[in-house]
Amino acid sequence: MAASSTDATTSPAPATPEVDETGDDTTGTGRPRTGRLPRPRVPRSVRTALDLAQAAHPRQLVLTALGVAGAAFVAGRPMTEVWLVLATVALGQAVLGWHNDLVDRGSDAREERPRKPVAAGRLDHGTVWFALACAVLALVPLAVANGTTAAAAYVGSVVIGVLGNLVLRGSVLSWVPWAASYALYPFFLSYGGLGGSYEGGAPPTVAIVVLAGALGVCVHVLRALPGLVPDNRSGRRHLPLRLALRTGAPRLLLLASLATALVVAGLVAVAATSGLTR
């Protein structure tokens, strides 16, 4: 006699392997079948903060802030004012870095630059705009804490840098915003002080201003070297690219490095002999 349907033994359906967020099949214990440990989960807020830091051009930010703060220290400013200079310059450099990546997000995306978080899609451009707006709002009072004249000089240098991100950067005059913004750093230092109380309070020497502007041109060339190939493909013809087409990138790197060393040595020599101010 045929067995009734209630007596039939039903085979259990094969278990569906669990898949964790890393894409690995897991067992009931949560261990991946491949034997690899699951990748640690990074909170979204931490990832956003790291991407914002990368979009701020951290290498240039740190070097510029340390350089200007170091000049303030050598000039004999109190440590409180040195830290204030460091924070002011660092925040201004973050503004310039974020603005640069926002302006270049289209061309960077076409060139597929993975180290650009905005262009790579890891960082929403609205988030960067929000961070940029907050930084600008914080930069103004922070700069004013150095004194109104010093604040005008530094905020002016940041404004010139922002304009440089928008105009002239693809032409033979690409060096002009860099020279002008760096030439304002000595004014920021010579007139600066907590609440404008620094006893210098005099304009910087002409030699210091000229050498600072020359340093800005050298930094422009060094900063442009890693992106010469993408810039050439996108049709930009800024000064570093024109020079590299004539000399070759390796030789231009050597020449720019030597020029930077000479300018820095000149700044140190002039500051040691005649001081920062007139």
Image: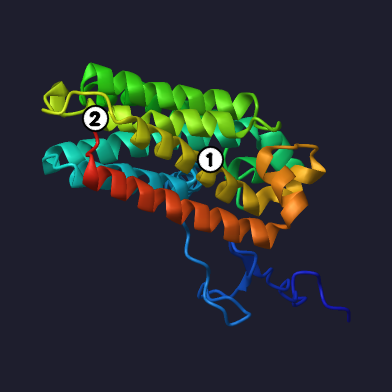
Quadrant for the C terminus, please: top left
Q: Nearer the viewer, residue 263 or 176?
A: 263
- Tell whether 193 sits left or right of 139: left
Q: Residue at x 52, y 72 (%)?
A: 30
Residue 150: horizontal and vertical position, in percent?
27, 23
From the image, tell me which residue sits under label 1.
Answer: 217
- Residue 127 shown left or right of residue 224 in the figure: left
Q: From the viewer's perspective, is residue 140 above or below residue 67?
A: above
Give whichever of 232, 44 is nearer the camera: 232
Q: Is residue 101 above or below residue 268?
A: above
Query: Could you tell whether 106 is left or right of 89 in the image?
Result: right
Mark 1–mark 2 distance (CA, rounded to whole Å) = 21 Å
- Quarter occupied by the N terminus: bottom right
Query: Residue 110 versus residue 26: which sits nearer the camera?
Result: 110
Q: Residue at x 75, y 76 (%)?
A: 11
Identified by mark 1, the residue type is Val
User: Which residue is the site of mark 2?
Assistant: 190
Label 1 or label 2, whichever comes before in sequence order: 2
Q: What percent of the width, then of the height, locates residue 136?
A: 39, 24
In the rendered image of this protein, does residue 27 appear above or below residue 119?
A: below
Q: What amino acid type is highlighted by mark number 2?
A: Ser
Across and down, in percent, residue 233 comes to 81, 44
Kindly give the residue lying farthest to the right in the view shown: 1
* Residue 174 horizontal/vertical position (percent): 63, 33
Q: Residue at x 71, y 74 (%)?
A: 12
